[in-house]
Image (cartoon, rainbow, N blue to C red):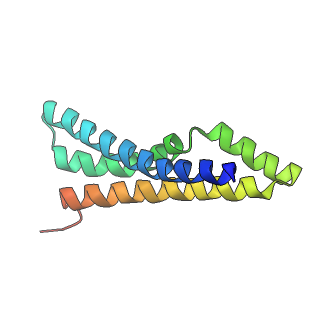
């Protein structure tokens, strides 16, 4: 029962960490583009696409722990750990996609004149 309690907060945190990394990186990158004379909204849209994978990696806590859990699940037969890790990655990917959707909505870069 304790394992179930520990998984749900990690699942929710994974989602919101990915959203935060993506939004924060895109906004700070846009600020840098503004200060250097560039186009901040275009830079924000571009940074959001570039930061997607890094938001997932940051949300799951680095890649080595994930590989260790998958290895343990495959070679030691602990399939519950593989499913949990897959769900955490899925949650992080959903958070990254939500962040990209928010940036796309804010910048309206997908709309052509």
Residue 53 higher or lower than 87, as above or below: above
Total marks drawn?
0
| Residue sitting at x 69%, y 54% | 1
Residue 106 higher or lower than 13, as above or below: below
Residue 13 higher or lower than 97, as above or below: above
| Residue sitting at x 43%, y 55% | 95
Which quadrant would residue 33 be assigned to in this image? top left
Quarter that holds the C terminus:
bottom left
| Residue sitting at x 21%, y 50% | 42
| Residue sitting at x 53%, y 49% | 9
Furthest residue in direction right, as rendered: 76
Give residue 35's position: percent from left, percent from top: 14, 31
Which quadrant would residue 79 be assigned to in this image? bottom right
User: In screen coordinates, is 29 left or right of 17?
Assistant: left
Residue 101 higher or lower than 64, as above or below: below
Q: Nearer the viewer, residue 15 or 23?
A: 15
User: In screen coordinates, is 54 left or right of 26?
Assistant: right
Give residue 31's position: percent from left, percent from top: 19, 36
Give residue 66's position: percent from left, percent from top: 67, 44
Give residue 103's position: percent from left, percent from top: 27, 55
């Amino acid at each position: 029962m304790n394992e179930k309690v520990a998984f749900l907060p990690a699942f929710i945190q994974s989602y919101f960490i990915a959203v935060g990394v993506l939004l924060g990186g895109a906004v700070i990158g846009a600020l840098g583009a503004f200060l250097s004379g560039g186009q901040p909204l275009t830079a924000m849209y571009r940074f959001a696409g570039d930061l997607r994978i890094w938001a997932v990696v940051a949300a799951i806590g680095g890649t080595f722990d994930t590989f260790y859990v998958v290895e343990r699940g495959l070679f030691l037969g602990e399939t519950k750990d593989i499913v949990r890790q897959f769900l955490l990655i899925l949650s992080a990917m959903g958070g990254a996609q939500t962040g990209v959707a928010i940036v796309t909505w804010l910048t309206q870069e997908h709309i052509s004149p």
